[in-house]
Amino acid sequence: MDKATYEKLTQQFWLSTRMPVSKDISDWKSLPDNEKRLVEKVFGGLTLLDTLQSRDGIQALRQYTRTQLELDVLNNIQFMESEHARSYSSIFSTLNTPREISKIFNWTNTNELLQKKLSIINDIYKNGMDCK
């Protein structure tokens, strides 16, 4: 299973630098403001969660690996989560002004529901999960 998972992960590998976001600027400008704000909030939330997963989540899971290949799978996932967060940042810096980017991350850092979700996930990473 580890080998199949590793192979599937490497087949789906991509880098943020290979996404020509600049080609989407005209489409972005034509979107209604409410749709832009929705996309920004979704990507802002994903950035927050991918960052947590790439930093704390994978580290918490490493303690349960039994083989080197399991560790390799987690390392691959960690890199992919980091790359996803970078991709969202690339999208923001291409499509948004610095002021808009600041507003997006202010929203992610102050949204009660998103912060609760982050807290629940982080608590599981830190303390495990009661599966009763």
Image: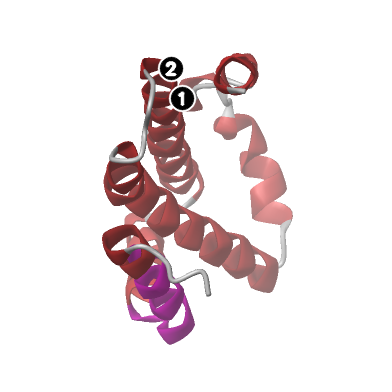
Look at the image and tell me whether residue 103 can be seen: no
| Disc 1 packing (10 Å; few <14; some 14–19; many ≥20) | some
Give residue 27's position: percent from left, percent from top: 72, 46
Residue 36 pos. (x, y %): 62, 63
Identified by mark 1, the residue type is Val
Q: Nearer the viewer, residue 59 or 91?
A: 59
Residue behind mark 2: 69
| Horizontal arrangement in the rendering, residue 91 relative to residue 31 (left or right) | left
Residue at far front of view: 132
Q: SS of the residue at dot 2?
A: helix
Q: Image check: 131 left or right of 11?
A: left
Q: In what element is the residue under mark 1?
A: helix
The residue mark sitting in front, 2 or 1, is 2
Q: Which residue is at 53% across, 66% downward?
A: 41
Of residues 67 and 13, which is closer to you in this image? 67
- Name the quadrant containing residue 4: top right
Quick one: label 2, few (<14), some, or many (20+) residues within 10 Å?
A: some
Q: Position of residue 30 (x, y in %)?
A: 72, 55
- Over which residues does the magenta segment extend? 110-122
Does the magenta portion include 112?
yes
Q: Is residue 69 above or below residue 107?
A: above
Image vertical order of residue 126 relative to residue 15, above or below: below
Separation (CA) of disc 2 from disc 1: 6 Å
* Residue 45 magenta-highlighted: no
Viewport quadrant of the N terminus? top right
Q: Which mark is residue 73?
A: 1
Magenta stretch: dominant SS?
A: helix
In the rendered image of this protein, does residue 70 appear above or below residue 38? above
Q: Is residue 50 left or right of residue 29?
A: left
